[in-house]
Amino acid sequence: MTHSNANQPSLESLTLRFLATRSDATTAVERGESEVEPHEVAAGFRVDPRTAWIDANSHTTGSPGPLPTEWAALVSQPSAAFAIPMAAGHFPQRVKDLQPLLKQFRPADLRPTGEEAAIPAFTGLRAWVQKNAKSNALVAAGIARTLGDFETAEALLAGANETGNEKAALLWQSGKSEEALATWNATAATPAVLFNRGMAELFLGRFAQARASLQKAIDAIPEASGWNALARLYLAVAEIHG
């Protein structure tokens, strides 16, 4: 069932807005929305490492600082991701393939199971994680989480402050989706938590709840953020399939 919303931008404009967080999106936008299908425009887009790094630090304190060693290689990884929590060290541009979201949406097949293979190598990035374990624990834990090194992520979070959202993100990435949502529901409603409640509800098939949570997230997250664009895209998915 599709829910219409007179104030909701078109799916094409939402897709292009989300893709505009990538380095070469301008060319596609200039081609015009009517020339391509929303799921087709995603193919071949590159992620801008600096933009991804800013988004990965968007709800932490302090300046993002210089890009870590091998960060650019990480963000260019071709592996698909669909249900991305807004958490330190995560970046919304990991959602690279939009077709499974827009066509036959099977949320159980798209959320993490915890059984995905860890990303191998990246010794330089892993060294950055260890070097910044105390000074930037949340982002270091998030990068470890993205690499699939859940034990390191858990150890880093154990010694950090304000980790409710981050621990829930680790539960989510570990395949414990219901426990993750329960943790987000019990955590203070920051913009990241609002986003993550909506994201989790969407990928658990709770479309009405997802729409409400994602709208709150859109209202709370700065419009220029890639996370705002992804929240709008997730809301469109909930509207289409809910």
Image (spheres, rainbow, N blue to C red):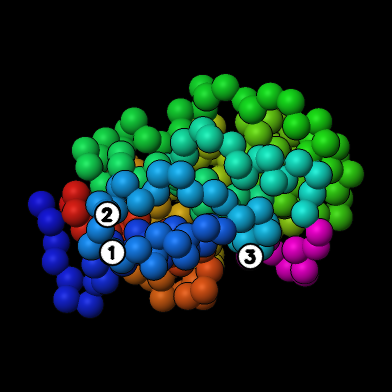
Residue 192 appears in the picture as rendered: yes
Front residue of 78/120: it is 78
Residue at disc 2, secondary structure: loop
Q: Residue furthest left?
A: 1
* Marks 3/2: CA–CA distance: 31 Å
Which residue, given by chain and number where applicable, does mark 1 sit on? 33
Image location (x, y in percent) of residue 105? 25, 40
Density class for disc 3 (Cα within 10 Å; few <14, some 14-19, many ≥20) is many
Query: Residue 216: within the magenta?
Result: no
In reply to whether residue 59 is colored magenta, the answer given is yes
What is the x, y in percent for residue 184? 49, 53
Name the disc covering residue 236, or none.
none
Question: Could you tell me residue 112's position as x and y percent?
Answer: 46, 33
In the shown orientation, is residue 235 left or right of residue 69?
Answer: left
- Identify which amino acid the numbered label 2 is placed on: Val
Cα–Cα gap, marks 3 and 1:
29 Å
Contact, mark 3 vs mark 1 (Cβ under 8 Å): no
Question: Who comes first in sequence, dot 3 or dot 2?
Answer: 2
The chief SS type of the magenta part is: loop
The amino acid pointed to by label 1 is Glu
The numbered mark at residue 36 is 2
Residue type at numbered disc 3: Ser
Residue 88 % position (x, y): 65, 54
Residue that appears at 61% across and 55% down: 48
Q: Is residue 139 above or below residue 231?
A: above
Q: Residues within 10 Å of mark 2 (few under 14, many from 20)?
A: few
